[in-house]
Amino acid sequence: MHVIEGTATVDDIDDFVARIGEIGTEHDCVVQAFDARYVVDRAHLEAAVRQAARAWLRDEAVARDAAVEILLYAAGRRQISEALTMGVGEGETPVVAVVVSDFPDAPFGTDDAEMAAAEALAGLLEPAETLGDAADEARICEFFEVGGAERAATDATLSELVRERTVLLTVNK
């Protein structure tokens, strides 16, 4: 799994998504981009990729597309329309994306195809550190329904609470 960070200026979301899909197809990789304001940290992305790969291997995937499956787990949602809130929108957006070459068998390995796809994807973005830096704690708490009472009742970090939602997606069928 390779993580790409940057800022996207998107005039047409359909064109942007199509280009990301073309990069994935061209390099035989799974590519999924997120609005970085909804991503807590790298561990959040790793949990989503791990759970999506596991569902795919067990033939329990919700989506027919591996990138969408990763999005569902990252969002902790079974409904694609709800998970798309985490996707990149039109305008200028901080972006973090994952590129996975050997999905679902070995999603955390890295190879030449993955590196080439990552470079192509980076070409669509203005360089910027977004992972963690762009995370919007209030936005994340609202989206993942992490309330003050839950945070007060545990010593778990926000990252741990969000990752818990990725795992619960499997349980909450």
Image (spheres, rainbow, N blue to C red):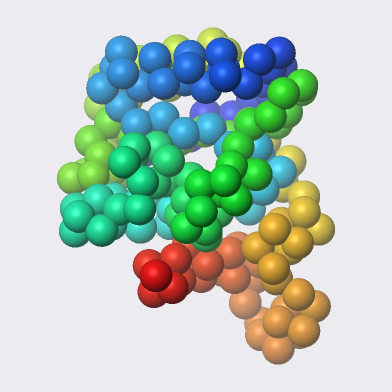
In the rendering, at what x and y percent does residue 55 appear?
28, 57
In the rendering, at what x and y percent does residue 106 appear?
21, 44
47 or 146, nearer to the observer: 146
**Residue 107, located in which quarter of the rendered image?**
top left
Asked if residue 137 can be seen in this view, the reply is no
Asked if residue 79 can be seen in this view, the reply is yes
Q: Residue at x 61, y 17 (%)?
A: 125
Q: Residue at x 77, y 84 (%)?
A: 149
Quadrant of the snapshot with the N terminus = top left
Give the farthest residue toward the bottom.
153
Instruction: Please say if 125 is above or below 34.
Output: above
In the rendering, at what x and y percent does residue 13 appear?
62, 21
Quadrant of the snapshot with the C terminus = bottom left
Q: Residue at x 76, y 22 (%)?
A: 92
**Residue 134, located in which quarter of the rendered image?**
top right
Q: Is residue 118 left or right of residue 25?
A: right
Q: Is residue 39 left or right of residue 80?
A: right
